Image (cartoon, helix red, strand yellow):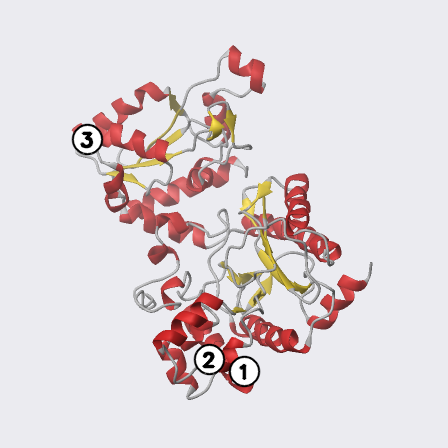
Amino acid sequence: MFNKETYIRRRAELKQLVGNGIVVLFGNNEMPFNYPANTYAPMRQDSSFLYYFGQHRDGLTGIIDIDNDEEWIYGDDIDVEDIVWMGFTPSVADMAAQVGVTKTAPTALLEEAFHNAQDRHQAIHFLPPYRHDTQIQLMDLLDIHPSKQREAASISLIKAVVKMRATKEPQEIEAIDRACDVGYVMHTTAQRLIRPGITERYIAGQVDGISRSLASCRSFGTIFSQHGEIMHGCPSDAPLEEGRLVLCDAGCELDDYCSDHTRTMPVNGRFTQQQLEIYSIVEACHDYVLEVAKPGIRYVDVHFAVCRMMTERLKELGLMKGDTDEAVRAGAHAMFLPHGLGHMMGMDVHDMEGLGQIYVGFDEETRPNLEQFGTNCLRMGRRLEEGFVVTDEPGIYFIPALIDEWKAKGHCKEWLNFDKLETYKDFGGIRIEDDVLITKNGCRFLGEKRIPYHPNELEKFMNEQ
């Protein structure tokens, strides 16, 4: 939690941006894992509630009445039985005072607050709900069916929250730096452990344990797999095999802020020539972003510059052919890069994605072509601004099912050498990802130390046992 003045200032700015009505920010509740008393732990608070009200306890709702200049936290104090099992928790009034809110009320009066707002013909602004219990609560309060709630959510509130949360304050940047420092330990531990015979699940478990030991939790489910061509490949019981590549995409959450890195390593600590040829392309694309990303640059332009660079280099290897610009316009590069260059990051690892990616990652001049494979998966294209935190994560993947489908259909055959692609079907995939802060004149890595990724330093690090 930051100091009280931070939350007072943020709510005041939100009032100015939204303009009128009441803003409702639902906190999260405990989520059962497989029966009611066995919950996911620790409880993860809603990020926007945290941003404006700072408290982590379950069962809270924040209301900002713009028209009457009032701020409320609704929630119930815990009873003795809860204290027996969970320990002491401050009262709702005490928690409210910690973030500069003077008015509190029990949850039972929340319905009355909604009715009063409706009687006064006030606009009721809420964000798109993503948890079923919140959706049910919202249906009870406003009689809006869950299937209609996303479209009924307040666009003005969404845009206000995105505007504020997109630009990170210095204290937020410090928190992300700390999370990235833990990310360094997570990934370098994996790099030290990788060797033939050890299982994917074992190394992923060690990585996850560090996130719980040095931070709050994982920022997302750890991806650790020799099948790097699977974007979200879960760790399996498969032993690591000599000559294969293994991809680790992992991050932690610390002080409510996230890290997110990806590294791809040779299982035996040495790249083959074929692996190095593909890896060097991804490395060059990754480093190009660091050279050009700065305020005023459209990230969608950086994405397509990377796609052209990748296409040129793949042509040198005989995997692609023809005119580079035409190939990229046709989406031929998406055979190898079916996702976007990166995404916003902050309190959420895909920051604010639940509010609608079209508002978070794009604006009127950068809306993506949602009909084209690959381009439809862009998450970030808008003009960069100082204080943005984005990921830089190019990759090259050889997906057998995609190769077979495009070959059978003759899709993009003018730019793809399918005979050559056949020889890469067992290659896997490579991704290199880092978290980048947009600064006044450029960008910088987040975190004190850089996780090894240049081939020579990576091989040296993995073999210094």
Q: Is residue 463 left or right of residue 20?
A: right
Secondary structure under tag 2 reads helix
Q: Is residue 296 among the parts visible in the rendering?
A: no
**Between residues 326 and 13, which one lies in front from this camera angle?**
326
**Between residues 314 and 147, which one lies in front from this camera angle?**
314
Mark 2 vs mark 1: in front: 2
Q: Earlier in the sequence, mark 1 or mark 3?
A: 3
- Amino acid type of the residue tagged 3 in the rendering: Gln
Q: Is residue 175 left or right of residue 332?
A: right
* Residue 330 point in image, percent of width and height: 35, 78
Question: Quadrant where the C terminus lies?
Answer: bottom right
* Residue 458 point in image, percent of width and height: 72, 66
What label sits on residue 118 in the rendered view?
Answer: 3
Q: Quadrant of residue 290?
A: bottom right
Q: For the residues marked 2 and 1, what is the alpha-carbon distance in whole angstroms?
A: 16 Å
Mark 2 vs mark 3: in front: 2
Q: In the picture shown, does residue 47 fall above or below 85?
A: below
Q: For the residues marked 1 and 3, what is the alpha-carbon distance in whole angstroms?
A: 61 Å
Residue that mark 1 sits on:
313
Residue that mark 2 sits on:
418
